[in-house]
Amino acid sequence: MEKELLDDARDRMTKAVAATKTEFNSVRSGRASTALLDRIQVDYYGTPTPLRQIANLATPEPRLLTVTPYDKSAMKGIEKAIMESDLGLNPNNDGQVIRLPIPHLTEERRRELVKMVHRLAEDGKVALRNIRREVLKDFKDAKHDGLLGEDDERRAEEHMQKLTDEFVHQIEELVKHKEAEILEV
């Protein structure tokens, strides 16, 4: 019982860290990456659709992204979604391809991006703490139902805290790397 709950918690925490890492990929550093556009949803025939599903994304140059829609009628919607995003990119549309030049980051914008990374990291840590809280409640319920003894519950809580600390450390490492990447001139 105890091992199953801890294994489930480990799986869920691994997914929470992976989700945080994915969010970090969409924060712009100084170079072009198609991952920047992962969060963009385009209103395509009345349905919010991920940009990747309606267009081909490429990085032909280190400071340029290109978006080639599969359906040219989606061009305006894609352009609007990019401009409304918090990426600070200015789309150039030639009727066939949308070009997104990646401007050099100012010191002020770098600081804003670092703050955004810290916010995303805090969201990831909150997710980890929520998982810990749910599993600790499951341990208490198991003790109440007679499936776990008091010593077993205490030991399981200690394991759960170590597990949480391990995953929080992973998020902090991700923050450190992303922050260095953003502040790199």
Image: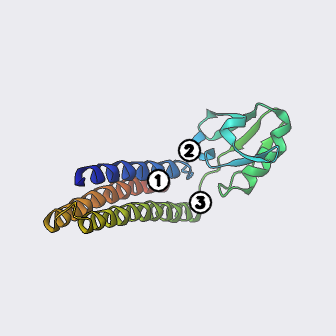
Query: Residue 75, image x and y in percent?
Result: 82, 40
Q: Which mark is residue 106?
A: 3
Q: Is residue 95 visible?
A: no
Q: Is residue 123 above or below residue 18?
A: below
Q: Whole-Å distance between the Cαs marked 3 and 1? A: 25 Å
Q: Which residue sits at x=54%, y=50%? A: 29
Residue kind at label 1, given as amino acid type = Thr
Secondary structure, mark 2, is loop
Q: Tell me the CA gap for discs 2 and 3.
A: 13 Å
Mark 3 vs 1, N-terminal side = 1
Question: Which numbered disc covers residue 31?
Answer: 2
Tell me where residue 119 appears, x and y as whole percent. 50, 65
Residue that label 1 marks? 20
- The residue nearer to you, when weighing 84 against 177, is 84
Residue 78: quarter of image: top right
16 relative position to 137: left or right: right
Query: Taking the image as drawn, is residue 92 in sight?
Result: yes
